[in-house]
Amino acid sequence: MQKIMTKEFYLIVNPISGSNRGLQTFEEVKKELDQRQIPYSSEVSHYSGEMPHLAQSVANKIHNDPQKILLVIGGDGSLNQTLNGVKKSNYPSTPIAYLPSGTGDDFAKAVNIPSNVHHLIDKLIKQPEISKIDCIYYHDLNRNASNYFVNNLGIGFDAYVVAQSNNSKLRDRLNHLHIGNLTYGAKIIKALANQENFEATITVGHEIHHFNDAYLVTTTNHPFFGGGVPILPIADPQSHKLYTIVVEKPSTLKFIYLFSKLLKDGSHMKDPHFHYYEAKKISVRTRPLEFGQIDGEELGSRSFDLEFSISDFNLLH
């Protein structure tokens, strides 16, 4: 008689993502797996920066076994940290399954990952698929550090909004009402009043593009940022290209006009204040000190000298 192979889940959990939405999702997953009598183990992050170590350990433990499922529960930052942990393991091609439980969840929107626990678990057990999804590898020349990200690395306006939102009590209250994305909108007004222009140099191949009045410089893997805002509708996480966007500082009224076009039909891309570049490799340098963010996590205020290249990972869904 042929032996029936049983799936086994290895959960990596950020319980405080989305103002404790991660913990709620974790409880739902455990209940679902218990009802189906599916074996599982869990690793819960207790402090910032622990998830890459947990993911690296889990990837090494499951040896890329197709019957063992690595499932991360958290937001975009949690997926980022899990990806980096897997990439540093002995099995960097280990597929990653993802249950979005954050505030913005831009990556889930970009690749249509369901947030319904029952549906995702059912799919992973019965008809799992592995898709090769682009991610971006970057090298920070100022700090001699390298890493990966799945959404975007932003400098200037969007990073200012992230910094304000991540330290906002309003975000916690809105997350409890399941409308945490509105936090970004509330902080845009403050960013409009305080974000200054800065110098940015974008290098694509042999072409150098210099801006004296950059307002936002974002290198991205897909259309969305800031909780589902389609800043670059043409971006595709399976195009094997990365995209760098530069927005030159407009007047407040012009910014509002551009933002309305962005939300309406994407025609903001035709405006002379908006520029974008696509390639497999792009370099970005900014001066002076500016806020930075990566997949919704703050990078602090500093100057940046970054080299980006396209990479990929295996998404289990």
Image: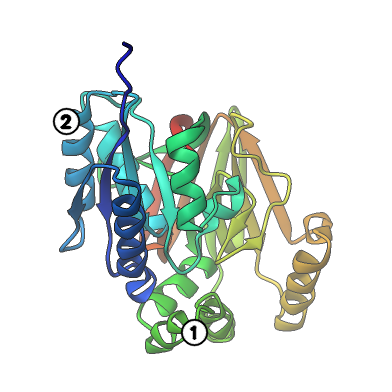
Give percent across and percent down for residue 102.
42, 65
State the image coordinates of residue 74 (x, y, percent, origin top left).
36, 59
Answer above or below: position of 299 versus 152.
below
- 165 is higher (above) or lower (below) than 296: below
Q: CA distance from mark 1 to mark 2?
A: 38 Å
Q: In the displayed orientation, state which residue is furthest to the top.
A: 1
Amino acid type at mark 2: Lys
Residue at 49% in and 84% down? 177
Q: Nearer the viewer, residue 265 or 278?
A: 265
Residue behind mark 1: 177
Instruction: Tell me the number on the disc at residue 102.
Output: none
Report which quarter residue 169 is drawn in.
bottom left
User: Is 10 in front, or is 40?
Assistant: 40
* Rendered image quadrant of residue 100: bottom left
Label 1–label 2 contact, CB within 8 A: no
Q: Is residue 258 left or right of residue 67?
A: right
**What residue is rendered at 67% in x and 44% in y?**
235
Label 1 Cα neighbours within 10 Å, binned few <14 / some 14-19 / many ≥20: few
- Label 2 neighbourhood size at 10 Å, few (<14), some (14-19), many (20+)? some
Could you tell whether 193 is left or right of 2 in the image?
A: right
Question: Which amino acid type is shown beneath numbered disc 1?
Answer: Leu
At 20% from the left and 62% from the top, the residue drawn is: 48
Of the pair 128 and 313, the residue shown nearer to us: 128
Q: Nearer the viewer, residue 14 or 81?
A: 14
Which tag, 1 or 2, sits closer to the chain's start? 2
Q: Residue at x 52, y 34 (%)?
A: 134
Q: How is the image coloured?
A: rainbow
Q: Is residue 81 visible?
A: yes
Q: Which residue is mark 2?
A: 61
The answer to whether residue 298 is visible is no
Residue 3 lies in what quarter of the image? Answer: top left
Q: Give SS at disc 1.
A: loop
